[in-house]
Image (spheres, grey):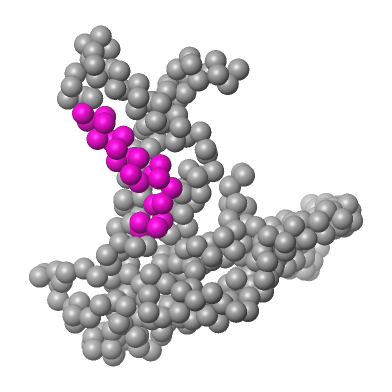
Amino acid sequence: MADEIASSGIRELQITKILPVLRDTFDLLKRTSYIILNIVNQLHTLYYKKDRFYKNVFKNFQLFSPIETLGRACGLIYLIDLIVLENLSLREDFNKFKNLLRSVAKEPARFDVNEQQLRKLERSLNKFERTILCGACFQGTITQTFDQKPDPNFTSLASEKPIKDNVELYELFTEYYKKALETAEVAGSPTETFERKFTYEMCCGYALYRKLFPGEEDSTLWKKIWYLQKKTPIIVLYSHIVFSISNFMSTLGALSRKPMIKDPKDPESYVMDFIEKKGDSFEKEMTGYNDQFCAWATQMDSTFGRASSLKDEKKYEQMFHLKNRLLMSGYSWINSV
């Protein structure tokens, strides 16, 4: 059946249908890359000791929100890489489509196209192949040249100094990751809500941070991020697309010198043991979740808070406080399951 599909041209036809998606994805990657570049340079300008705004304003507080935005932007780009690398047939089908175009180029009139249209399509295909389909967009983004030439219309003292030598900016990033680790450590706990996604974005931002300051390697910070996999060995991003902290930290976030001590020492064995233990306790956990849900649903559907209880105005405040606590506890519980 697979051979019949391959020879029928269905795969080449499917590639034509996703070309608009590839174009939109390329535009998104390009725009996001420029946004990352812009945010880094603005932070470089604001957190520079000779700048008057730093002396009068930014020296007195830590602006963490742009760094979180960098993590989200980097996470978006890396997610596209993971999707492409997971789809093994995409590149193969794309090559089949390019071979088909070579045949069309020999007799363009037969297919009602002209040479100009074919050249335009070929340029687009080459552009997609060099960026999206190589599965290395994230690597290209974090290794781009962040030190920009000074804008004549906007003078900045920070432009005189490379980003990698900006001590104030390095300290801002370092303090952010120390604070971010406190949030990421909540992942895997009963009170977890958004921490898994936050951990993923934090790791992506960490890779950018390491590229911005290549001469600075905080092995302690690296080990703390590595340790997070003991709580969340695998983070599900979308459908079957998963993020492995160990793989990421061993490649895009690797130290120049291999750490002597790291916990877990063997990530693959740890994941297998983690899954095995989860499998053994699965039935018990599901029973517990069912009991918790039944208790919560019973309270939410209780007569307390229905129209009949509204006759007593003194119970209004008590009723709303109770319902609010139940809603919040239910939201937290669902996100932690």
The answer to whether residue 109 is seen in the rendering is yes
Q: Is residue 197 left or right of residue 210?
A: right
Tell me, yes or no, whether the highlighted magenta stretch contains residue 251: no
Corner quadrant of residue 151 = bottom left
Residue nearest the observer in this picture, 51 or 314: 51
Toward the left, the furthest residue is 152
Type of secondary structure dominating the magenta stretch: helix
Measuring from the top left, give residue 154's x and y in whole percent: 15, 72
- Vertical order, 61 against 41 (above or below): below
Corner quadrant of residue 146 = bottom left
Toward the top, the furthest residue is 110
Measuring from the top left, give residue 153's x and y in whole percent: 11, 69
- Give the residue at x 20% y 77%: 159
Residue nearest the observer in this picture, 213 or 79: 213
- Give the residue at x 55% y 19%: 3
- Give the residue at x 58% y 56%: 243
Measuring from the top left, give residue 329's x and y in whole percent: 74, 63
Question: Which of the image's four quarters has the C terminus?
Answer: bottom right
Residue nearest the observer in this picture, 129 or 257: 257
Measuring from the top left, give residue 104's x and y in whole percent: 28, 17
Residue nearest the observer in this picture, 73 or 276: 276
Tell me, yes or no, whether the highlighted magenta stretch contains residue 136: yes
- Vertical order, 227 against 52 (above or below): above
Q: Is residue 208 left or right of residue 260?
A: left
- Give the residue at x 48% y 43%: 84
Corner quadrant of residue 120 = top left
Q: Is residue 173 left or right of residue 287?
A: left
The answer to whether residue 296 is seen in the rendering is no
Report the magenta residues as a range.
Answer: 119-141
Q: Is residue 196 left or right of residue 282?
A: left
